[in-house]
Image (tube, helix red, strand yellow):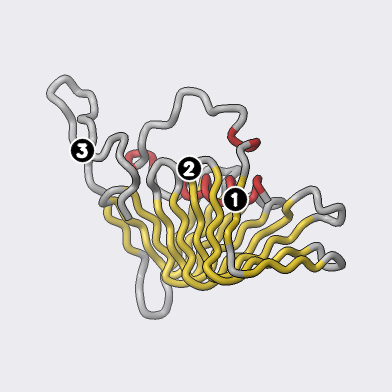
Amino acid sequence: MTRAIVLTLLALLVALPARAQAPAPAKKKADDKSQPITVDADRMERYGKESLVVFTGNVVARQNNSVQYADRMEVYLDEKGDRVLRTVSTGTVKIVTRDCRTGTAKRAEYDDLEQRVVLIGNARVWQDENVVSGDTITIFLAQDRSVVQGGRQERVKAIFYPKDEKKDGQAAPKATAGAPCQS
């Protein structure tokens, strides 16, 4: 489950174009995947034969300063229970990454084999004022590619603000640098 949460949260990192992204760390810490995960929920059920764990009621999953909220989270494991194959989060889904990117949708699906995250139903991803929204946002992790689709009632909408720059050409520091995410 640790890998699925990390990848789901990291998927939001590729949802915005590069110019809207915060600078990436020079080197990713090797221990990010080994960080503990904490899941709080009103109820947890394990279905051994189906290799399924279901968390329901005010689900909050945290790892490495990233958090995912949902009404329900289903975690599908391999036959041995050692590896997450896919996750499905439903209800009021909200994901906040450690670099303050936020995504919301009615449903979020992660598929490990295809390295794909899909936000479905009034999907929206933003950081600062930059926003991408549509009916469905599909993020292909291995390809560093995302696709946003509109629905019947609303087209895709994207708003990107240019970065503030100092006179010497370097990006100006954000007022919220070092502060907790504002959502």
Residue sitting at the far front: 42
Residue at figure coordinates x 53%, y 40% from the top left: 64
Which residue is tagged 3? 175
CA gap, disc 2 and disc 3: 20 Å
**In the picture provided, is 87 more to the left or to the right than 90?**
right
Residue sitting at the far bottom: 153
Looking at the rendered image, the disc whose residue lies closer to the viewer, 2 or 1, is: 1
Q: Which mark is residue 1?
A: none
Q: Nearer the viewer, residue 46 or 146?
A: 46
Q: Position of residue 13 (x, y in %)?
A: 46, 44
Which residue is tagged 2? 65
Secondary element at tag 3: loop
Q: Position of residue 38 (x, y in %)?
A: 59, 50
Secondary element at tag 2: loop
Residue sitting at the far top: 168
Question: Tag 3 or tag 2, which sits nearer the N-term?
Answer: 2
Residue at figure coordinates x 32%, y 63% from the top left: 157
Which residue is tagged 1? 38
3 and 1 marks in contact (CB < 8 Å): no
Looking at the rendered image, the disc whose residue lies closer to the viewer, 3 or 1, is: 1
> Crowding near pointer 2: few (<14 within 10 Å), some, many (20+)?
few
**In the picture provided, is 53 more to the left or to the right than 150?**
right
- Does 145 sit above or below residue 48? above
- Does 48 sit above or below residue 152? above
Residue at figure coordinates x 43%, y 57% from the top left: 103
- Identify residue type, mark 3: Ala
- Identify residue type, mark 2: Asn
Q: In which quadrant of the rendered image does the C terminus lie?
A: bottom left
Q: Position of residue 94 (x, y in %)?
A: 45, 61
